[in-house]
Amino acid sequence: MSALSEGLTQIVIPLASLVGIGFALLQWFLVSRVKLLSQDSSNGYKQKLIESDEEEEGINNLEISIKCTEIQHAISVGATSFLFTEYKYLGIFMCVFGAIIFLFLGSVKGFSTKSEPCTYSQGNTCKPALANAIFSTIAFLLGALTSVLSGYLGMKIATYANARTTLEARKGVGKAFITAFRSGAVMGFLLAANGLLVLYVSINLFKLYYGDDWEGLYESITGYGLGGSSMALFGRVGGGIYTKAADVGADLVGKVERNIPEDDPRNPAVIADNVGDNVGDIAGMGSDLFGSYAESSCAALFVASISSFGISHEFTAMSYPLLISSMGIVVCLITTLFATDLFEIKKVSDIEPSLKRQLLISTVLMTAGIAVVSFFALPSKFTLFNFGTEKEVKNWHLFFCVAIGLWAGLIIGYTTEYYTSNAYSPVQDVADACRTGAATNVIFGLALGYKSVIIPIFAIAIAIYVSFSLAAMYGIAVAALGMLSTIATGLAIDAYGPISDNAGGIAEMAGMSHKIRERTDALDAAGNTTAAIGKGFAIGSAALVSLALFGAYVSRAGIKTVDVLTPKAFIGLIVGAMLPYWFSAMTMKSVGSAALKMVEEVRRQFNTIPGLMEGRVKPDYANCVKISTDASLREMIPPGALVMLTPLIVGTLFGVETLAGVLAGALVSGVQVAISASNTGGAWDNAKKYIEAGVSEHAKSLGPKGSECHKAAVIGDTIGDPLKDTSGPSLNILIKLMAVESLVFAPFFAAHGGFLFKFI
């Protein structure tokens, strides 16, 4: 028996969720104390609510503040408008795919309402397959709605905070950092707490019907992870295409051809670029990490439900994954205070160490938290399902499984930082390669991306071996959960990046002094690295989540072993390994097509609007926003269809063994491509910023802005944009989404799959 009672468990989990939500609201309140200007609908701007303690020389602060408010409003309206349009399409998809889940799973036993023998709990009777169809569909819709909410809330706080960060930069880099970081923390804690709370409430509501049938209950809950990831896929791809079409168009024409600064208000694509940061890097990323969290929890719960926990109805032990996430919220809350209250940022060089310290502090504290949860929530000995056999496990085994996932995440994060931060030699070498043009810059960047895969893959491999040896597939599932246990902190430092990027854009567009822009650029450069770290976490956790889901799928589909030497499995393996390349080709071409239209439109405006280059008239921002919106909504459908339809087609036509091969192939190649793409793009971006900042003698020798070296760096950054913000981060969703979809549909594939092979 667990030391923690069921009654206490039922209190601790929702309490931790509510604490997380409360802390997020507190951070939001603190950010809101940085006031913009109020606007009266009839009288216009009428009240001056904030001014800097330090007046900028020769600049009208009131006018600057009004401009900041106008720009923030334009970005917020653009981002909200795009998301509502995107969510209308996704609403249709949710209804259609929900119907597919119901029809496929309901048809397993001919929509029978009769109870049936349990698959794993021998001798017991479980609820009918029709119930699984209904509740899996409900769980799918709940997961999808929570994912959409996560993305939307993240976007709202980011657009709320960007101008406030700009205004605080006038008081010093420390004030701006705290505003940006607190805003990121709002998103991190809301997402972690909402995801946990909805999952906990869903389990308890489903239990009202399922009663003692925990096998059926937790099988249907896997739909929650499917809903979360399917929304994340479209959010990441659609948002990624939007933001990179605008970014590429703005950079190629503005910086390379016209030699004007980044985020210059004369550039027609500048508003679309800033909107894109929020719909891609914030809303898409929020949905993505929520999907990872939901899937790792669902994988762990499903495997536990067919082990001794589920069969003997030990609720506290079953809730171990939820208790780990609850502890994570408390640990991240303490960690956040180190960045916002306990350590003060006094100069630019303090920013990146402060963000790195967040990762280390949360990991150390969480290790102690895992030990506490493992000791109190788990019996000293228990058995776990291990592909048809029972494996005896001790509670300290699971402590090591979760802890190794947590520390593997830290290693991946620090490795990513080393390869993407311009404080270290890999990015400086890429910047140095710009001396001989864009070609050598591209060659060095690609080499860096491929090399950056090595350490993360070894970290993932060791985590898999240790966790599987100690606790079979359940060990891998909780290792993934360990990597995501500090998701609130991870998201805070991730969301901080786009908020700082927007703040810099607003400073440039509002005409603030060079000193303020230097501060926001410093925040943004650190944010680029933290965004890359966030992607590293997402990809690493996706590998573990996908493997855990793969194991659950193999168990549910009734496959004893996956033998790659059999033709059925091998053809699946080689096709699965190809899918990440097909998917990347589709997403990159989509960005290229949209960017082509954007470049033509920006050129047209510069060439045909008199006085635009001189700054006498405003460009037509709305047309560029429309190009990005139309392209992203149109182009996100084919890649999304590829991912969503592949498991359905392969499982139905070729059967469970071939689908197992596809999942394994996609996992193995997808992780490599995703890491290299994300890190290559991040390195090119920071190589450009290294030259622009000119903080060292080496950097000064390569600059200044507008030099041939700088133009070569901009070209490299432009090539890297779709790699780091569209294809790379979307690939981790591909591998885990196909795995969770296969698990949800496993009963149908096991009963009716392999249609083609029956005739061969």
Image (cartoon, rainbow, N blue to C red):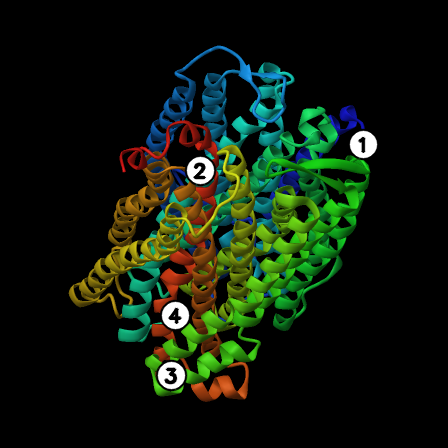
User: Between disc 3 and disc 4, whose residue precedes?
Assistant: 3
Residue type at the position of mark 1 = Ser
The residue nearer to you, when weighing 83 against 572, is: 572
- Residue carrying label 3: 709
Work out how far the residue at label 2 is from the one at label 1, CA to CA, in angstroms.
33 Å
Work out how far the residue at label 3 is from the one at label 4, CA to CA, in angstroms.
12 Å
Callout 1: helix, strand or loop?
loop
User: Between disc 4 and disc 2, whose residue precedes?
Assistant: 4
Determine the image quadrant of residue 339.
Answer: bottom right
Of circles 3 and 2, which is in front? 2
The residue nearer to you, when weighing 388 against 270, is: 388
- At x 27%, y 65%, the residue is 616
User: Between disc 3 and disc 1, whose residue precedes?
Assistant: 1
- Residue carrying label 4: 717
- Residue carrying label 2: 742
* Residue 260 visible in rendering: yes
Work out how far the residue at label 3 is from the one at label 2, CA to CA, in angstroms.
49 Å
